[in-house]
Image: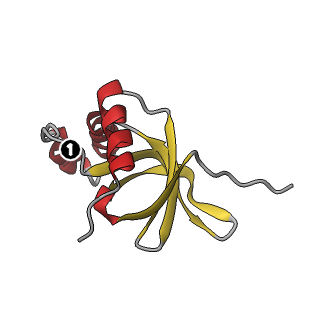
Amino acid sequence: MPEPDELIVDIAALVESGQSNQMSLTVVTAGAVITGRLAPEAMWRQRVAEVLTDSADLGELSAVFDTPAKDGPPTRLHFHVARILQGTVGIPETGGMYRVAIEDVSAWTVGGFSYSDH
């Protein structure tokens, strides 16, 4: 496996230290283009746990996300309000929660993409 891009590791570390979810990033991973805002892992885990807790069918799975993140340099990007870009649409329309291995990112750019009918 190739080593992850040092710059994207640094960006992920800054997001983790700042407890912010305002950093927009677009990545290419395994042929998919994902665009959205990065979130610290703890914030991402909390939000996923909340969504699962509110589900009648999946509530018991929320405990998996209550475990704290491991110490050390970040190995994953945690996207909040993110979309997989396909053609002229973003899936899901309202944005989702994605976790991407940094080592699997083949290309990236700072900022998000959005669609317009104009």
Task: State the image coordinates of residue 104 (x, y, percent, origin top left).
Answer: 33, 65
Q: Which residue is mark 1?
A: 65
Residue furthest to the right in view is 118
| Drawn side of residue 104 relative to residue 69, left or right | right
- Total numbered badges shown on the rendered structure: 1
Query: Which residue does the image show at 50% across and 59% down from the upper left?
Result: 34
Task: State the image coordinates of residue 102 (x, y, percent, origin top left).
Answer: 32, 56
Residue furthest to the bottom in view is 31
Foreground residue among 75 and 46? 75
| Drawn side of residue 105 relative to residue 34, left or right | left
Q: Residues within 10 Å of mark 1 (few under 14, many from 20)?
A: some
State which quadrant residue 86 falls in: bottom right
Q: In this picture, is 8 found above or below 87?
A: above
State which quadrant residue 73 falls in: top left
SS class of the residue under badge 1? helix
| Drawn side of residue 91 relative to residue 28, left or right | right
Query: Which residue does the image show at 28% across and 39% down from the upper left?
Result: 41
Q: Give the amino acid type for the residue marked by disc 1 in the picture.
A: Phe
For the C terminus, which image quadrant?
bottom right
For the N terminus, which image quadrant?
bottom left
Task: State the image coordinates of residue 75 (x, y, percent, origin top left).
Answer: 24, 51
Q: In this picture, is 23 found above or below 87?
A: above
Foreground residue among 90 and 3? 3
Query: Which residue does the image show at 52% across and 64% down from the upper left?
Result: 33
Foreground residue among 84 and 33? 33
| Drawn side of residue 88 relative to residue 58, left or right | right
